[in-house]
Amino acid sequence: MSYVATHEHHHDDHDHKPTGLGRWLFSTNHKDIGTMYLVFALIMFFVGGAMAMVVRAELFQPGLQYVDPEFFNAMTTMHALVMIFGVIMPAGVGLANWMVPMMIGAPDMALPRMNNMSFWILPFAFIMLLATFFMEGGAPAAGWTMYPPLVTQMGEGFPFLIFTVHFLGVSSIMGAINIIATVFNMRAPGIGFMQLPLFVWAWIITAFLLIAAMPVLAGAVTMLLTDKYFGTSFFIAAGGGDPIMFQHIFWFFGHPEVYILILPAFGIVSQIIPTFSRKPLFGYKSMVYATAGIAFLSFFVWAHHMFTVGMPLAGELFFMYATMSIAVPTGVKVFNWVATMWRGAMTFETPMLFALAFVFLFSIGGFSGLMLGITPADFQYHDTYFVVAHFHYVLVTGAIFALMAGAYFWIPKWTGHMYDERLGQIHFWISVISVNVLFFPQHFLGLAGMPRRIPDYSVQFTEWNMISSVGGFVFGISQLLFVWIVIKCIREGKKSGEQVWEGARGLEWTLPSPPPFHTFTIPPKVGAMAIHS
């Protein structure tokens, strides 16, 4: 990247930085709000992880050991809700808050007060959701998909579940509007759309997906609410409704949601691989078009989650071909990442290791997804542990590993301190080995016919379940090392300069580490060449 670098920062000696509790409660600064999102996501990561540990402890051996089936179902349901809406989405928004204004030369987000509100909705929403554990009838136990009629048999926690989903949707939509407004209106002079970093592009597209998909979920859960309390029969067969209609509405949200979770990860990896390959990203324009293509196609594949409900053959064929077609733009991205590394002067610091693991293991999740997309095969795989293995390869070794990579990549810029590289590498190797011990055996369990979401199982599945549970506990405990690395970095890491990584390109790397509280008070003047190259 080249700049005509007449690019001044306005740092006064006193950085107009509010202090104390008020700084965080009333903050309109994109860096502080980004930090709060990331800390919230990390806390929820351990809450959701603890629920997963309950599941894996129960499944270590056949027979009911520790919890009753109803509580087991609540654990699987709440684990999913917490990890999707409380970890991956807020962590992605946190990274966007921190990095998007710095990457485009903006002083802050376009709508700073709304930014504050979109964050503070989250803790209250999750307090409300977790409070259902203490209500009559217990926490939601119908799966994160909330299928009727099972979900409407919930106790007093039901309306709290519905309102939590509404709050999470409002928070996401507000965050998305903010990102779109910021990128469209606040780019530094000289930065056109085709000069934006891939991370920014990934977030523009994700933001449009959020605005399109979240209201669909809101509609679906509102219909559930009126079915339970207001005498409607949208999904009640006895009143002329159809529970399958809920599945159609839910998955019309649910499939774009999958890409809402993974597209920011694509953006992170597209920043990291060129940096540590010391080469420009291969095929920048094709990466932008592929990301947009994935988002567009995501609205035409929803019923591949429903092949077994009795769809007409024409419907099954359409959704099968649509599902297979989405592999094409995804394949373009994987090809371009590999081509970027080809003949690059590669080094293997922790962010690059997580990014490489992402490319390799996410591809495994993609391949198993293609298997599930083939209708006759899906009749065998549906609702087995093969599906569980598939989406955990996409969301753990995909989304979570990319978020880890992003945290290691940018934390020296955020804090002005370098993390401990040796500890980072130890964290990576324990994580990558244990996560495969955790999830790979689940492919075999699924192919052998073990159903998902069950607290007990036939004795023939014992060995793979024991191996999977051991991997789960090692993976879960090893994430405490990540927390220690972050704390150690903030407290005592050695100072990092402006240009933290040798191959890093972009406006954010021209700022001091840590960046001043108010970043670009005078817009940087950017040269003619692309800022992503």
Image (tube, grey):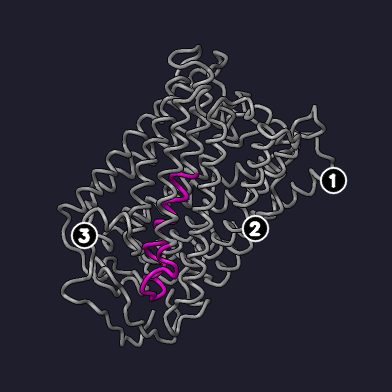
Instruction: Give 178 or 87, whichever is nearer the viewer.
Output: 178
Relative horizontal placement of residue 440, taking residue 154 as reference (left or right): left
At label 1, the amino acid type is: Ala
Mark 3 and mark 1: span between their CA atoms? Answer: 62 Å
Quadrant in the rendering for residue 273: bottom left
Mark 2 and mark 3: span between their CA atoms? Answer: 50 Å
- Residues drawn in magenta: 85-113
Instruction: Specify the label residue 19 is tagged with.
Output: 3
Instruction: Specify the label residue 328 is tagged with.
Output: 2
Residue under the image location 54 percent in, 13 percent down = 459
With respect to residue 475, does 453 lie above or below?
above
Q: Position of residue 229 (x, y in %)?
A: 66, 32
Residue 319, visible in the rendered structure:
yes
Instruction: Specify the label residue 106 is tagged with.
Output: none
Quadrant in the rendering for residue 173: bottom right
For residue 90: magenta?
A: yes
Q: Position of residue 305 (x, y in %)?
A: 68, 40
Magenta stretch, overall SS: helix
Q: Residues within 10 Å of mark 2 (few under 14, many from 20)?
A: few
Instruction: Specify the label residue 314 is tagged with.
Output: 1
At label 3, the amino acid type is: Thr
Relative horizontal placement of residue 390, taking residue 49 as reference (left or right): right
Q: Residues within 10 Å of mark 1 (few under 14, many from 20)?
A: few
Residue 356, visible in the rendered structure:
no
